[in-house]
Amino acid sequence: MSKIACVLTNMFEDSEYTSPKEEYENGGHELMVIGSKAGDTVEGKNGEAKVKIDLGIDDVNPEDFDALFIPGGFSPDILRADDRFVTFAKHFVLKDKPIFAICHGPQLLITADVLRGRKVTGFKSIHVDLKLAGANLFDEEVVVCGNLVTSRTPDDLPAFNRESAKLL
């Protein structure tokens, strides 16, 4: 079974973390939450989910993980200001490992400059950013491009979860 790295900080979209997490764990996969500091607790923007950080970004090696999961909300925008998270995310693209990014999740990949020529989707407010990053944008519930799975909103979670699970 796969070991999945989930990068997360405060203001994530609650259901975009909890729903895929449940899907992955029900499939027998291990999800490790990576944040700024191990032991910290981060909270979703709707206040429905509080998540304890398993590992700090300084304490992890991307080689130890089989896939990357980036929930949406404001979390990806906050994380992309930190070069450690950008470098961590870029590793998964360069090593052709599965990446699952929903809503604003692709923002971290935009900053990593790894979307040029890739088929993607994301939340409406980042469509222009995705295009400017060189991505081929599709306004669909889920877009799969090789090992990259992207979706737009919590409404797309069933399709996002299904396609992510297929890659695992």
Image (cartoon, rainbow, N blue to C red):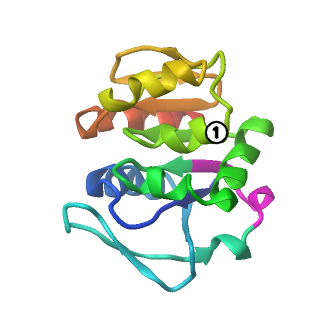
> Which residue is pictured at 56% across the width and 56% down the height?
81
> Which residue is pictured at 67% across the width and 34% down the height?
113
Q: Quadrant of residue 21?
A: bottom left
The answer to whether residue 104 is above or below residue 15 is above
Residue under circle 1?
A: 98
Q: State how many labels appear.
A: 1
The quadrant of the rendering that contains the C terminus is top right
Report if residue 141 is visible in the image.
yes
Judging from the image, what secondary structure is the residue with disc 1 in?
loop
Q: Is residue 60 left or right of residue 74?
A: right
Residue 41 x/y as whole percent: 40, 80
**Depth order, front residue of 1/53:** 53
Residue 31 x/y as whole percent: 54, 62
Q: Is residue 108 left or right of residue 77?
A: right
Q: In this view, does 77 lie to the left or right of 91?
A: left
The quadrant of the rendering that contains the N terminus is bottom right
The answer to whether residue 139 is above or below residue 100 is above
> Which residue is pictured at 37% across the width and 38% down the height?
103
Q: Quadrant of residue 136?
A: top right
Q: Does the magenta stretch include residue 63?
A: yes
Q: Badge 1: few (under 14), some or many (20 or more) residues near its Cα, within 10 Å?
A: many
Residue 121 x/y as whole percent: 43, 24
The answer to whether residue 6 is above or below residue 98 is below
Magenta range is 61-68
**Depth order, front residue of 116/92:** 116
Q: Which amino acid does label 1 sit on?
A: Pro
Q: Quadrant of residue 38?
A: bottom right
Report if residue 1 is visible in the image.
no
**Depth order, front residue of 35/1:** 35
Residue 105 x/y as whole percent: 46, 43
